[in-house]
Structures are given as C-alpha cells and as structure tokens.
Amino acid sequence: MLLSGTTQYAIRAVVHVAEHAVDEPLRVDEIAAALDVPRNYLSKTLHQLVRAGVLRSGRGPRGGFQLAEAPEALTLARVAAPFDDLAQRKCLLGRATCTSRSPCSAHGRWEKLSSAMLAFFGRTTIADLMAEIAERPSTAPANDRRASKATARKASPSRARPAGRTRTTP
Amino acid sequence: MLLSGTTQYAIRAVVHVAEHAVDEPLRVDEIAAALDVPRNYLSKTLHQLVRAGVLRSGRGPRGGFQLAEAPEALTLARVAAPFDDLAQRKCLLGRATCTSRSPCSAHGRWEKLSSAMLAFFGRTTIADLMAEIAERPSTAPANDRRASKATARKASPSRARPAGRTRTTP
DNA sequence: CGAGTTTATCATATCCACATGATAAATGCA
DNA sequence: TGCATTTATCATGTGGATATGATAAACTCG
C-alpha cells in the first residue's frame, strides 16, 4: 500500500468527522461503525490526531471528536504525519541519504514523481475530499462551490441523540 | 516506504547483477556483500526472481545468478511483481474496488498521480538504472558527472575467482 | 566417482503494524 | 453527589514481513 492502513483510517476518519460533526462532536462508535474499522484502534488513532492538532476531543456525555481547524486548512500531509513519514518516499530504493549529490541509481528518474506526490499531500486538503458529498447541484452552481452544503443543513443524525439544545461551536 | 524492503533489495540486486555478471554468473555472497543485505534472505529473494523469469541461476562451481533477459527488457514492474502489488496503489485509501464508477473520495484527485506511478514502473527498465555506469561520455557532460566512474572499467573483482576460461552466455 | 562449491529449501526466530479487551479518567447531568 | 457516558490508556494477542541457521540438492572438476 502507498499509505499505511492506519494512515488511511486517519484520513477517512477526518473526512467523516468533517462531514458529520458540524454541530456537535461525533463519537468514536459512530465513526468506527461508519468506516467499518476497529473501535479501540480507531480511538487510539484519533487521539494521535488530537495531539497533532488535527482534531479536538471531549469526554463524557456530549463528548466526541470535532475538527480542530477548518477543513480547508487540514492537508493530507498534516493528517498523515503522525503515522507516516511521507518524505521517506523520496528515494525509491529506500536510501536514507539520497540526494542529487549522492543519488541512488533511480534518483534522477524518480525525483519528479516523488516531488509531485509530496506536493499532492501538501496541497490536497480534507475540504477537497469532502467535495462530493457537499456537492448538490440541484440549482447547478457553476464550479466547485461546496459551500452549498449550507443549504442541506444537518444531514440526518445516524443515531438519535437526546437532542438537547444544539451547541454551536462553544 | 513506497516499495517494500524486499522489493528494494530485488531491484538493487538485479541492477547489480546486470552491471557485474556480464561474463560469468555472480554468487549470492558477492551480491549480498555488495548490497549489504542478509545473504540467505537475498538468496530466497533472488530465487523468486528466477521463478519470475527475471534471473537465471545455476548451482555448484561456476554457479550463481545472471539476467534472464536483456536489461532493456526488464521493467521495474516485472522485477517488483513477485513481491509487491503495484496496482494496489491505485486507490489512495486502500479500497479494493475504487473505480470511476464507484470512487473513493480521493479518487479523482489521486488518479493522475497513480497512473503516472504505474507508468513509471512499467516503462523504467533495469538498463535505465544502469545508465550511470554504462554511460561513458568522454566528451564531458557539464553537470553532475559521477559518470567519470565509468572510465575505470570493470571495477576490481571483490574476490579473486580461479579465473578460468570466460564463458560468454551459453 | 568423490570432494568441494553453490543454490534451494526448511524450520525457526524477531519485530512491528494492527488489533482486542479491560480498566482508568474525565465530563455532563439528574 | 453520584451515576451514566465517553475518551484515554494499559496489557496483551496475532499475523506477516524480515531475518537466521541448518540441511538438502544440484553442479563442476580433479
């Protein structure tokens, strides 16, 4: 795999949180069920994302996970960082020191692709991956305005919560 | 890592064989020493390459490993195939079925890069990675000329062989 | 043939990513 | 305050990639 399983969990989880934890935090159980991923393992993974400043968490009733920043600010590189050293892929043959000064035999040919990959992870954001759910072109917004999500407010809560007063980002 | 450690061994080993096993086969001990990888593990790895039709092997005195085909015919994809399912990297999030019909959230954005990667492995050959030793541009290429090594043809054989009659590809 | 050399293969060992289950700690609320 | 809820953490298990060491099988050559 290109990314470790844990990193894939992390990206999918953060996208899911970004999409569904708009009003109130989302609990691990819901995320794990939605992604079909082991609950306790995901819990640990999410906690690492909290420490990395990608998510925020709270315990007890009304606890759960939310984004710590706007999805447009969360690059895949940031989400993957705690689990995967992406820069390591710069050398195809795994040499720790593979520079243009001391290149491995594949260096010159691989360089362009590896830079493109790093750029991809550095530029693609969680918001980019949310696009397809957000899109709802009934009124046909021309290009990529996923802001239209605002119209479809509050996608049906998968599990009925006591439905207390809605807390809007305390 | 992008490629598994074993795959990296395999590529480096095949390049080494291509460069040094021109007259007579090369023994595992020499390859393992040159690459600084565990001998028996490499032996097993090389054997898989034999079964894959990348290398040829022989036992006993005058045994060892040679290329089974011209280095121009050996793509990285072929060398990596026994160890690594490169096509699996087509989906960033690891979904088995991730097509344009049923795409993961990253599909559209990742597609171009993943195809470029597959193309790279399908087109780059062992000969390409030998280039720097093979090249002998006595007419001075301006920058980055590590090719000057090439002038010192046939780097000293690390271990003296009985030096019998040279057998040229039977 | 028989001795020596070299790959092929087998039986284990080690390490790490991934996962599980139980318990602790924090939080909200009646 | 005390109970229910939810994350945090700990102890442990499992499987596969990576290695190791020993033995078997094939080959060369005197």
Image (cartoon, coloured by chain):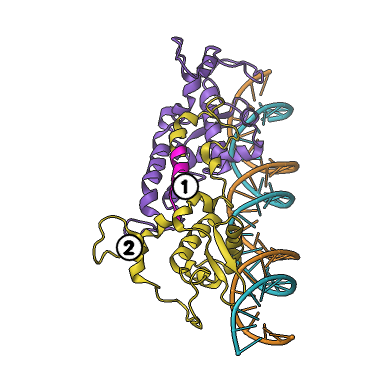
Chain colours: A yellow, B purple, C cyan, D orange
Q: Who's the residue at 57% across and 58% down the image?
A: A49
Q: Nearer the viewer, mark 2 or mark 1?
A: 2
Estimate the x, y position of residue D14 in percent, counting from the top left.
64, 63
Front one among B18 and B170: B18
Q: How many marks?
A: 2
Q: Which residue is mark 1?
A: A121
- Judging from the image, mark 1 belongs to the subunit labelled A
Res. B70 visible in picture? no
Mark 2 = which residue? A135
Q: Is residue A167 left or right of residue C28?
A: left
The three-letter amino acid code for the residue at tag 2 is Glu
- Name which of mark 2 and mark 1 comes first in the sequence: 1
Q: Which residues are magenta?
A: A115-126
Question: Label 2: chain?
Answer: A
Residue A63 falls in which quadrant of the image? Answer: bottom right
| Residue A78 drawn above or below residue A158 | above
For the residue pair B8 and A81, the one nearer the viewer reads as A81
The furthest residue to the top:
B139
